Amino acid sequence: FLRLAADVAAAAASADSVRVWEAVAMEPAWRQQGRGRGRNQDAQGERPRPQPQERDRPGVSAGRGAKMKTNPVPEPAKEESVQSKFEAIRRSNQAAAKRLVDSHVSSSSSDEDNNEDNNEDGDRQRGKILESTFTSYTSQTDGDSSGLLRTGQYLSDLFQSGALTCLICIASVKRTQPVWSCSGCFSLFHLPCIQKWARDSVFLISSVTDEDFGQKQHPWPCPKCRTEYPPSATPNRYMCYCGKLQDPPADPWLVPHSCGSVCQKELRPRCGHTCLLLCHPGPCPPCPKMVSVSCMCGKAKPLPRRCSNKSWSCQQRCGKLLACKQHACSQPCHTECSPCPRVGLQGCVCGRQTAERPCASPRWNCQQVCGALLSCGNHTCEEVCHDGGCPPCPRSVSRSCPCGKTKSSLPCTEEVPPCGDTCERRLSCLKHTCSMRCHRGSCETCRQEVEKECRCGKYRKQMACHKEYLCDSKCPKTRTCQRHQCRRKCCPGNCPPCDQICGRTLGCRNHKCPSVCHQGSCYPCPETVEVRCTCGSTVLVVPCGRERSTKPPRCKEPCRTPSSCHHPIREPHRCHPGPCPPCRQLCFLPLPGCEHTCPQPCHDLVLIRSQQVQLAGPWEQPSEPAFVKKALPCPPCQVPIPT
């Protein structure tokens, strides 16, 4: 037990020493030089340390007149102690190496997004990644990659600096960040951003529409294409594009956020085949499989065709009988026959008129009143053009007086007289009845005086029953946008939705929200901005608001900036952002007083440290930049000559 405790203590001490050295190594240089007042003094005043030989020798005194006590340690215990120390140091080194690798991967991804260089190794590596992703597809199409244009655009955006932007937070989507891809528009969003967007969207809809708040399952929309997802589809895990691997690692030789395996998603339109590409962003390409299919009309023999373009026409006459049952289809091979295009004389339903009508719609009405004599022999049919016999006379059945209390059977030629009783039909107010005697025609408006309550319920007043009472008080409640008041006169409480324009500044800081005033976050700005290189040949399309933080795209064209020194042409180099590098050509200007030229490199614009005044403290700002560009004179001629 004592030996085990000693080993544990030794391991802890070695681990603590490793941590101390790591902490010291992480400190800046000015703190490693020394601490306190004596950090700028010489080391001659430091206390001398004992030599290792003297310290390790047994019997050397630890103080004046005292000897060090030595306890002999057995050899097995020494070996175990050394082994435990070695294991502890090995574990700490492995942990430090893992932290170094993680920081290198994150820094490399940020450098790839923000500080892309113009070396050809990166282009070659990206070309290999794209080639490995498309190999399984192009092997089926004999090298034809015309169906990979859309998918290739999404893949190229992954490697282009600033092309992938989360539209919710308007920040770059990096290789090491967990993301979510929309199945409608295939846009990438940060996983925490889309989770917050889904929660806020469902909360706002529930708070406005639900009487029992939070009980209904409302969908949430995609911020870009408005594709609706149920609450159960809210992403809670970081998955690769094909959905097979959770938390895919950041592999520099794979597509970012990809698992590297075959996609195997079912292709659309559904044909029974699956995607052959490696796990990829964007839509799956058309099906490259070869199938044997017949033509659309089924007359020709089956031919091998690409599954994504298997419909073909043999150009023979269709000949199928059309819906009119009189003519045959004369169009070339197709899927479904169109209505009969022929025109002929067609009679109306009642048979009074004839007109040229399409053969596909022979039944039509002439919009004339029938006018045929009814069975009573006294009245005519009042229906519009119809087929079959006319209906019986409506006056030949049992009829009632105008108020409906008395029924009588009279000939159709005689009108039923009023009964003389009180009318008592419901008036338009639906509260009172008509007090007149039985009469023909509609009843008059209600004129009784009643106490009416206004629509908002604050005031009461005696007035005619048929009039509506509205007070002049304005509603102080806020509308559904929670920003503007209702201000409607005599509002009953069901305030209408806000009809004003939102007008809040969007996340891009360039445009304002054009939607009707609403709660919650505004939708991202739908505009896009072009970021061009210095010469304008290469263009990168980014979401609005990202143009200020996006680096210009890499351009392979030569730099066109005119020379700033006395040389007529700059040294050839590629287009780049920022100022051109200093000229490295030889000066070759004639030296004054002799016939030789200056052999030094060009010194028309040389960075020279400016003479700055000593600052009193960090609160003062320098008045001039640290370095300024100046033209230096040519040095004296150094060519030896005989004198």
Image: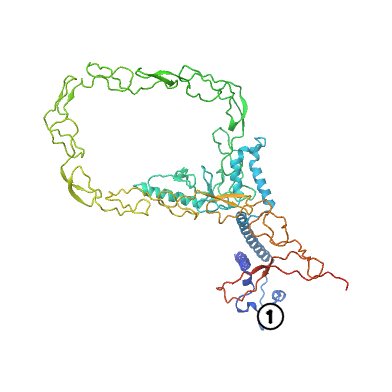
Q: Secondary structure at mark 1?
A: helix
Q: Is residue 586 visible?
A: yes
Q: Is residue 62 left or right of residue 470?
A: right
Q: Is residue 480 left or right of residue 360?
A: left
- Relative vertical location of residue 181 with respect to residue 315 in this rendering, above or below: below
* Residue 133 image position (x, y, % from top left): 63, 43
Q: Closer to the camera, 638 or 498?
A: 638
Q: How is the image coloured?
A: rainbow
In the picture, the quarter occupied by the C terminus is: bottom right
Q: Please give the residue where the numbered disc 1 appears in the rendered image.
A: 44
Q: Is residue 436 left or right of residue 15?
A: left
In the picture, the quarter occupied by the N terminus is: bottom right
- Relative vertical location of residue 417 with respect to residue 525 in this rendering, above or below: above
Numbered marks: total:
1
Q: Is residue 6 visible?
A: no
- Relative vertical location of residue 267 with respect to residue 57 in this rendering, above or below: above
- Relative vertical location of residue 90 with respect to residue 122 in this rendering, above or below: below
* Residue 139 image position (x, y, % from top left): 66, 37
Q: Is residue 508 left or right of residue 42?
A: left
